[in-house]
Amino acid sequence: MSKKCAICGADINLFQTQKLGDGSQICRKTCRKLGLPSFEYEHADLARVRAHHAEAALGGKLWEQFFVPRMEETYNELRKLKRFGKSVYVSEEIGLAALKENRYKYLFWGKTEHVCVYRIADLRMYDFEKVVTATKKTTKVRYFIRFYFRNIDGLYTFRKQFSRKKCISIIGYFDDLFGLETVNTWDEKKSGNLIGDIKDIIAMAKAAKEAGIQPGCTNITPEELERIMVKAGKIKEGDHTMRLAMEERTSPIDRNKLTPDEFERIMVKAGKIREGDRRKWVDKADATFSKFRN
């Protein structure tokens, strides 16, 4: 039995259906392709999908009018676009940033561009994320920047993968734009060698002895183990504010279905929102949009 697409009204079967977070269904052939590939349809409700489609339609027009003419600029430093990776573009001259992603009909043929354009002034978070994927043979480390924009109802947050060095430079770049001091929160200690491992073993044994744990004892309580770890300097504190804020606000089941307002409240509580001076970028974006409307 076929169903109707909630946006265009087309008849769709099981294999043509994209289910949304609120239970609505849209067609994969047409309506799903109106948005950017990184937009998570399975976690969004119908209202947010419609908002994203409107943002993508407007973004395409803004891209053609303001970004494309600046793509080949080489001499005028003010007009040159700042590009991060293959998809994130920033124009300081017009006060706008863009996320451009491509879809392909088959492999590398039939390319279509999809763009969301944001005001630089609305960028409230650009956070460093490290993802470690361990397998039986190797351990893969990837680095991302998580972007969050205010005043956006559709694709208000996304993350993009960069090298570790590039992630640090991106954070420094936006901190400079907003007059903020860059705080280093991504230091990593290099893995130790054989001598370092021996020193760790000695430190652990010494800490266990000071904690009153007899050699060969296997019945250690969690409290005793933590005391040993603290004395040996093995406790990694890190930044747990994000995790605690998420767990306090929402359960693991619905944390992917947050509205923009809920997401921002969590980011504020976790201390991830970066304010800075944005008046200059507000004025530039407003001037650009007034030209676009005229």
Image (cartoon, rainbow, N blue to C red):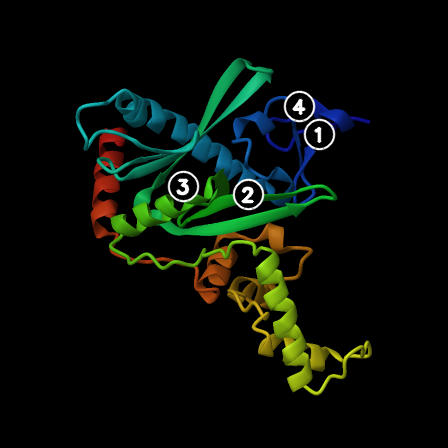
For marks 3 and 2, the one nearer the N-term is 2
Q: Residue 155, percent across and down?
A: 49, 41
Q: Quadrant of residue 222?
A: bottom right
Disc 3 vs disc 1: Cβ atoms closer than 8 Å? no
Callout in the foreground (4, 2): 2
Q: Are marks 3 and 2 in contact (CB under 8 Å)?
A: no
Judging by the rendered image, the residue that carries numbered circle 3 is 166
* Residue type, numbered disc 1: Thr
Label 1, secondary structure: give it. strand
Callout 2 secondary element? strand
Q: Secondary structure at mark 4?
A: loop
Badge 2: residue crowd in 10 Å (few <14, some 14–19, many ≥20): few
Residue 19, placed above or below residue 32:
below
Can residue 7 be seen here? The reply is yes
Q: Nearer the viewer, mark 2 or mark 1?
A: 2
Earlier sequence position, callout 4 versus callout 2? 4
Three-letter amino acid code at the position of disc 3: Lys
- As drawn, the label of residue 10 is 4
User: In terms of depth relative to the viewer, which is nearer, 191 or 153?
Assistant: 191
